[in-house]
Amino acid sequence: MAGAVTDVTDNNFQAEVVESDVPVLVDFWAPWCGPCRRVSPVVEEIASERVGSLKVVKLNIDENQQTAIKFNVMSIPTLMLFKHGQVAKTVIGAYPKQRIERELEPALA
């Protein structure tokens, strides 16, 4: 499916995110998190609009604590944009799509 948001885990994070040839937006979330549920459709919209230029994945921090700890995710939702294996931008909190895109745009340019 084009623009699909896929799930990543501690086990495949390195291959799917850090070693990706294209920028990757990671949505750190948990099922019990209300704001995460609000930001999820926005993340899916961004994924479908940027097919080919941006990969979008979700990481459930309850099931994948090692990765969350490694990247100091203290509160969720946290969106991290990875470019060339490095964190290029972090957006913490549930914001409207325009705000998220505005935050990410400089790092995607």
Image (spheres, rainbow, N blue to C red):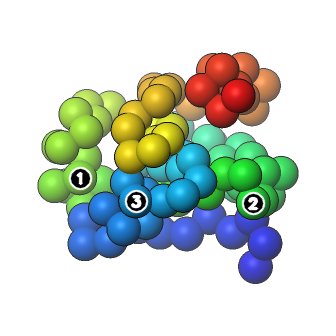
Q: Tell me the mark number nearer the camera, choosing from 2 and 1.
A: 2
Query: Whole-percent x and y of residue 52?
Result: 75, 60
Under circle 3, the secondary element is loop
Label 2 and label 1: CA atoms lie apart by 25 Å
Tell me where residue 60 sits by quadrant. bottom left
Provide the residue designation for mark 3: 19
Under circle 2, the secondary element is loop
Provide the residue designation for mark 1: 67
Q: In the picture provided, is 62 more to the left or to the right than 5? A: left
**Of 69 and 12, the residue lying toward us:** 12
Residue drawn at x 62%, y 64% as measured from the top left:
5
Name the amino acid type tagged 2: Gly
Q: Tell me the mark number nearer the camera, choosing from 1 and 3.
A: 3
Query: Of callouts 3 and 2, which one flags the residue occurring earlier in the amino acid sequence?
Result: 3
Q: From this view, report whether residue 45 is shown above or below residue 108.
A: below
Name the amino acid type tagged 3: Glu
